[in-house]
Amino acid sequence: MPRKCGPGITDSGLLVISKVDIAPYARADLAVMRRDAARFRGNRPFVLTDCLSGHGVRAVADHLTGMFRGRPA
């Protein structure tokens, strides 16, 4: 949860918030997660993912590919 604001949230190259498909069942508000991630990360990237549907997976892959090529995605 971005609100916890630990070093993984604030300092990682890419914050991946996964399993967003189950957010409603865990009483998690995705709009709040997006807002908190943007607030605590500033210009650092983050992506919400759901691997079952593929939502956000391409963004993660593109970011990693860019890192290996020496440039951020």
Image: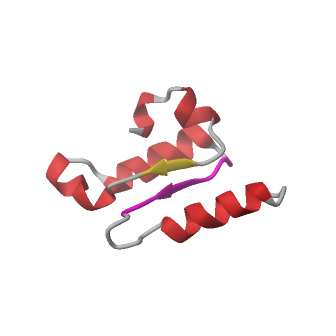
* Outermost residue, right side: 70
Q: Which residues are magenta?
A: 43-50
Residue 27 lies left or right of residue 67; in this view the side is: left
Give the x, y percent position of residue 54. Answer: 41, 72
Give the x, y percent position of residue 45. Answer: 62, 52
Answer whether residue 1 is magenta in the image. no
Measured along the vertical axis of the image, is residue 9 above or below residue 70?
Answer: above
Q: Is residue 72 visible?
A: no
Q: Residue at x 54, y 42 (%)?
A: 39
Between 58 and 26, the residue placed more toward the observer is: 58
Report the coloring of the rendering: secondary structure
Q: Residue at x 50, y 45 (%)?
A: 37
Residue 32 lies left or right of residue 60; in this view the side is: left
Residue 28 lies left or right of residue 31; in this view the side is: left
What secondary structure predominates along the stretch shown in magenta? loop
Measured along the vertical axis of the image, is residue 3 above or below residue 61?
Answer: above
Answer whether residue 44 is magenta in the image. yes
Quadrant, the C terminus: bottom right
Q: Residue at x 42, y 29 (%)?
A: 4
